[in-house]
Image: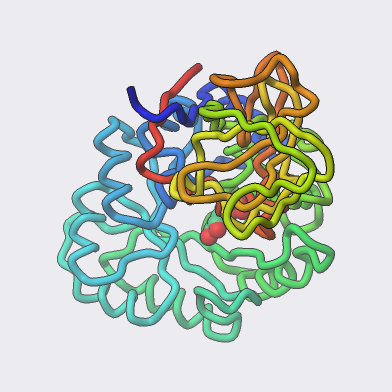
């Protein structure tokens, strides 16, 4: 028997989240962002749920190859562009569109031999100071690209640093709009937070949006809004079973470091999930779980293969009970990955991406 732990990818939830995103930006085409192996879900596992998208955006060339191998003939965008000259050969062969964010990438393109000119997305650093040409240098980069026979169409792109917070997107939108004023080409600006929070703001409408996290049912601006506030559905559930039950007396402790001490007699369940499965070790006592669909909490430190939950108020639950660490529980209950992530001082993105390879994953409708 394998260890009783399982992750489930929900295809219908992916489909519904994509639809929800389309409603928020009805005029835009959608790049479904599937980098980091579809935010930990597995590209092959999300493909069916996201195939209604207009394109897939990612950054690992091997992941692009996998999307083509699934039979996808539509657009694929490399969000970081190429890393070395031979990557351009793969772009030519697989028809990949690629971001151009630095002079070195233009140099590589200028030396590339191809019969099929490439579609490129010229990235502006409008304030995030990660990738892209500054507004002052953007036009010169565009002019240089435009003169290359290797380049077909040039689209214009930037990325927001604060779409999820109070600073918002206005300053970056203004910089982008000003520096691209009379440049032709399609535009792509918004991540999930910008789509959900700012789609109707002046200047934010664009030809393509680039949602990632919202497609996976996690709120981009938790805790200000939860996934349910945005009408997003969890696409990843992590469950494990209770493999042992202990009865504690007042004063007994739980787990490494004895960080939890019982104040009264308690019943606790030992669950077959630990940090080696991707559950954060930083989750403290009190992190929510669902036991047979009923909300309870963790007790003590998370160890490599196990964690402990409170069964004191759940007399029906015991050995073999199903514990939902995040996602869908029994009887329609739901535990948002964002709530668990917040307990560990992080975000849903990180928990999804950290799901360990040893956890078996099934795909459901
Ligand atoms: C350039 C770019 N566009 C879009 C996204 C998608 O962002 P989110 O998952 O917040 O929607 C990312 C993710 O970091 C990104 O780097």
Give the residue drawn at x 24%, y 47%.
Answer: 94
**Where is 13 relative to 346, above or below?**
above
Q: In this orientation, does residue 205 appear?
A: no
Query: Which of these two is toward me, 305 or 84?
Result: 305
Whole-percent x, y for residue 115 in the image: 17, 57
Q: Quadrant of ligand 1?
A: bottom right
| Total count of labels | 0
> How are the residues colored?
rainbow
**Which image quadrant is residue 233 in?**
top right
Task: Name which quarter of the figure residue 61 lies in.
Answer: bottom left
Q: Mark yes or no: residue 197 visible.
A: yes
Dividing the image into 4 quarters, which one contains the N terminus?
A: top left
Residue 317 rendering spot, x and y as whole percentages: 67, 19
The answer to which of 171 and 205 lies nearer the viewer is: 171
Is residue 80 found left or right of 259 in the rendered image? left
The picture places residue 118, in percent across and down from the top left corner, at: 31, 58
Residue at 48% x, 19% y is 364
Residue at position x 36%, y 43% from top?
Answer: 357
Answer above or below: position of 4 versus 205. Answer: above
Is 333 on the left or on the right of 35, as rendered?
right
Q: Give the residue displayed 71% in from the left and 37% down from the top.
A: 248
Q: Position of residue 347 (x, y in %)?
A: 65, 54
Q: Is residue 117 left or right of residue 326?
A: left
């Amino acid at each position: 028997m394998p260890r009783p732990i399982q992750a489930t990818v929900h295809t219908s939830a992916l489909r519904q989240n994509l639809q929800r995103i389309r409603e928020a930006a009805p005029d835009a085409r959608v790049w479904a962002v599937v980098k980091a192996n579809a935010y930990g879900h597995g590209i092959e596992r999300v493909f069916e749920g996201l195939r209604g998208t207009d394109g897939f955006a990612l950054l690992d060339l091997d992941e692009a190859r996998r999307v083509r191998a699934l039979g996808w003939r539509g657009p694929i965008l490399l969000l970081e562009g190429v890393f070395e000259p031979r990557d351009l050969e793969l772009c030519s062969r697989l028809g990949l569109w690629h971001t151009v964010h630095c002079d070195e990438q233009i140099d590589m393109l200028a030396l590339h031999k191809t019969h099929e000119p490439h579609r490129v997305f010229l990235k502006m650093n409008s304030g995030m100071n990660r990738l892209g040409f500054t507004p002052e240098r953007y036009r010169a980069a565009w002019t240089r690209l435009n003169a290359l026979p290797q380049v077909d169409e040039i689209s214009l792109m930037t990325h927001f640093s604060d779409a999820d917070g109070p600073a918002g997107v206005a300053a970056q939108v203004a910089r982008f709009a000003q520096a691209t004023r009379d440049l032709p080409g399609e535009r792509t600006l918004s991540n999930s937070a910008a789509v959900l929070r700012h789609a109707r703001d002046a200047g934010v409408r664009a030809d393509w949006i680039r949602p990632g996290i919202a497609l996976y049912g996690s709120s981009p601006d938790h805790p200000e809004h939860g996934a349910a506030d945005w009408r997003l559905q969890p696409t990843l559930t992590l469950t494990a079973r209770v493999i042992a039950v202990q009865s504690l007396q007042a004063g007994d402790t739980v787990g490494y470091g004895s960080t939890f001490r019982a104040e009264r007699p308690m019943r606790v369940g030992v669950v077959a999930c630990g940090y080696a499965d991707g559950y954060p070790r930083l989750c403290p006592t009190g992190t929510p779980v669902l036991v047979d669909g009923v909300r309870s909490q963790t007790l003590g430190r998370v160890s490599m293969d196990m964690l402990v939950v409170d069964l004191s108020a759940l007399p029906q639950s015991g050995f073999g009970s199903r514990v939902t660490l995040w996602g869908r529980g029994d009887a329609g209950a739901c535990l948002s990955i964002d709530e668990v992530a917040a307990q560990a001082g992080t975000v849903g993105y990180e928990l999804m991406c950290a799901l360990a390879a040893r956890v078996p994953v099934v795909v459901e409708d």
